[in-house]
Image (tube, grey):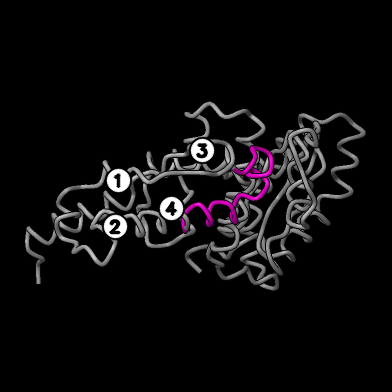
Amino acid sequence: MKPSAELVRLQAAFGRSIATPLQFLDDDGNYALQVDRYDEVAIRAISPRAAQTAADRLGIYNQQYWFRLLTVMQEEFPLTEALMGVQAFNRFSMAYLDACPPDSVRLRDLSNRLPRFAVAHGLSETLQESIRLERIYIEAFDAASLPVPDSDDLAVAVRLATEPLRFQPHVTLFEATHNVISLRAKVRAKTVVTGADLEQAPGSWIFWRGAGTQAVELGAIQALLMRKLLAGVPLAEACETLVETLDDEQVEFFATHVQRWFAAWATAGWFARPADL
């Protein structure tokens, strides 16, 4: 049954009112409700109770709405919060959620536009990197797991070498410039971390979901190969074109290790079976 136009207007008015941003008063966490911004349609639909006006009652929902969303953001971005400071992070999160309100019933999607917003908002490169990292943890936790290839099937083995590899949705390459991965682990272990703890630490990491979300740092040549594979270059072609860019010592190193690398990646479950099998 289609809802009446009046009900639709009331729901929209209520939604706009409870999503009204809180007004931060200082850097100590004090805030005020912006009652004057509540929709009059919503206020008129609520009956006063005892000492509470209709706006007061609506304010309870407004407050709880933001407490819930800010708590989720703090839980999902512990490193970013630590680097920014809790009050600055809350302000930034509220600005983001005001500009990009939730468009999904799943909390995992709450921050799916945050990396782009961080760029547009002018956050530092380090904070953008922290946000990208913490989004990887969210996505890896919830991403699907597809059937894995049958390692004993020769036909499948040939296809894995000659066709673009199909990676599991939870596998992500992360290019780090700072020590954000180790700092995030410290934050989760309740160690106090600030921006002063940031250090240059360039590296390439693969994240995937195994027994929880796992990460491994790739060597320089491993990373070159993985970038090609993730870009859709078939394994045999990727190896051939990569070798052309290496010196003799690197070629020998690559030839000695590539089979072991690929076997380890397959054992870790990074690859999915071809879609048509």
Mark 3 and mark 4 residues within 8 Å of each other at the beta carbon: no
Indicate which label's residue lies in the foreground, 4 or 2.
2
In the image, what residue occupies the spot 25% across and 47% down? 38
Give left or right: position of 119 versus 65: right
Q: Secondary structure at mark 3?
A: helix
Give the residue type at disc 1: Val
Mark 1 and mark 2 residues within 8 Å of each other at the beta carbon: yes
| Marks 4 and 1, how far apart at CA | 14 Å
Residue 21: x and y in percent read 38, 43
Q: Which residue is mark 3?
A: 92
Give the residue type at disc 3: Phe
Q: Which residue is mark 4?
A: 66
In the image, what residue occupies the spot 62% across and 66% down? 155
Q: Secondary structure at mark 4?
A: helix
Earlier sequence position, callout 4 versus callout 2: 2
Q: Is residue 53 magenta?
A: no
Residue 117: x and y in percent read 47, 35
Q: Which residue is mark 1?
A: 35
In the image, what residue occupies the spot 79% across and 33% down? 196
Earlier sequence position, callout 3 versus callout 2: 2
Q: Residue 58, labelled with which disc? A: 2
Residue 49: x and y in percent read 24, 66
| Marks 3 and 4, how far apart at CA | 13 Å
